[in-house]
Amino acid sequence: MGRNTRKRRSSMANKAIAASAALALGGGGLIWANFYASAHESNNNGWSQNQTKAAAAQVATISCPDVGQKLTNVPQSARQGVATELANLDKQITEAYARLASTRQAQAGDSGFVQNAIVGPLKEKRAATIDRIRLDVQRVGGQFNTSLSQLAACTTQNAQTNAGEAGGQQQNGGQQQNGGQQQGGQQQNGGQQQGGQQNGGQQNGGQQQGNGGQGGNGPVAADFVDITKVQGNAQLGVGQNGLPANGNSGSKGSFTTKCGTNGNDNHNTDNVIVAPGVANGAHHLHDYVGNQSNDAFASDQELAAAQTSCQNQGDKSSYFWPVLRVQDGTQDFDQNNDGGGKEGNVGKILQPAQAQIKFVGNKKGNVVAMPTALRIITGDAKAFVNGNANANVNWSCTGFENKVQLETQYPICPQGSQVVRTTNFQSCWDGQNIDSANHRTHVAFAQADGSCANGFKAIPQLQVRLVYNVPAPKLQNGTVVNPYAVDTFPENLHKPITDHNDFINFFSTNTMNQMVNCINTGKKCQ
């Protein structure tokens, strides 16, 4: 099966979002952003570049509360309609950013333009959408928290051009985040922004040098670090998220499934978990291994009957993650597509050199079988604007994995070493639901001792390790040459903190039982 090329609805004809710096404060979606784009200055794929002078630079703060994370009690029969409306909210925010980036002249001449022409209409659109969510919930007898209607309003205010010290140490007059470190290493000062200029617009093999990367919206130099210069750390993941659940006690076995590295280029920009029935619901491209029929419109019956890239034909599960690209001046097949070049996801797609998929046990005791069609999302594709509460990120290099795991920066690996993305999934299940309204509360991470809280049951922990041959980027005069980055929502600026991974269980009953038996009896099976 090749690349998914079915015709899709266009989410926007041309999005001209070019945000060169942003900082999320807390979980409400508060974004500090420098917009230097002109609607008339675009590259050959229609994506606006940050090429205006410092005098034209304007800075705005837009706060749009995350409605989806607040919806925890949506009746099953209303979830399709609610998911569609949540996708509309994403689209509305994306369009608002495009409007901000394409109206510089009007904003400069009218201090009320942003409020009157962008934020006000955005509030009206969001209010109508949230009300449709209310109707969807109440129509089937569900309870709607009326306070959610207050989440329609987005606010704006001026922000400092100098977002803070390079490298993400401090921001905005001394405010600090995450123990003094900003998410994603997203500071653009110290030569990376220089008032919105990009080294005079220098090019290197077609790549824009400076703030915006090849697509105009990241990554930047502060998003990278030489791994040989990073002090070692022992903890994996952000906070307690993503810690390995297994150990030297309890259920010590493992089950490995070999599903390839997406050598047949099975890609799309959908997300059947978060936005079922919505084309381009992810606004970025995914790699798919395992199940070969996963797109926004796939039913559980279609997924269960699909072909699989896994050697073990009892595994028709779907494993998917955002693609990794190198921005070396080249383009890929989707340079003119929604979710691709139209939304700032540009450059050459890198196929993993290795995609290791393994299930392990629990250090406290035995595991139980996963239910068919169980959905698990780990990490947060919007962590840069949502905050890191749901982030689950591990970046490293081969030869350094037991020493250094990075969360807010991409590693620059030494010669002979490869880039590694490692994800340890949630491994506690509520024992009842295959999904939840916000796609999170039906599963949880095990506690430090391996136990599951709140009566949850231990299930096999999925561990995905992706290894890439990535040409090492170079940092020169505050810019990054030939960077690599994961695909993201446009406003998340290709930050490493946004990496995420998705899984839908379609193991056959027999194969799942074999997995559980192997893990609980301490065997290593594949």
Image: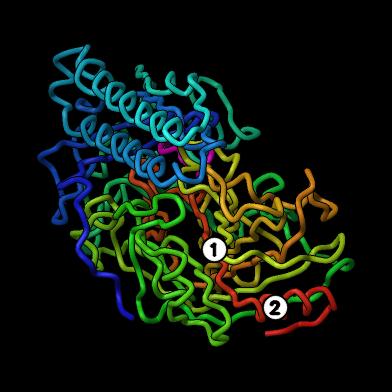
Residue 503 numbered tag: 1
Asked if residue 151 can be seen in this view, the reply is yes
The quarter of the image holding the N terminus is: bottom left
Extreme residue in the left direction:
40
The local secondary structure at tag 2 comes to strand
> Which residues fall within the magenta stretch?
182-189
* Amino acid type of the residue tagged 2 in the rendering: Phe
Please identify the dominant SS of the magenta region.
Answer: loop
Please state which of residues 442 and 139 is positioned toward the viewer in this rendering: 139
Task: Judge whether 186 appears above or below 297 on screen.
Answer: above
Magenta-drawn stretch contains 194: no
* Amino acid type of the residue tagged 1 in the rendering: Phe
Kindly identify the residue that appears in the image at 16 percent across and 36 percent down.
38
Read off the residue under disc 2.
255
Please state which of residues 513 and 428 is positioned toward the viewer in this rendering: 513
What is the x, y in percent for residue 68?
47, 37
What is the x, y in percent for residue 139?
41, 33
Q: Is residue 107 left or right of residue 413?
A: left
Please state which of residues 108 and 83 is positioned toward the viewer in this rendering: 83
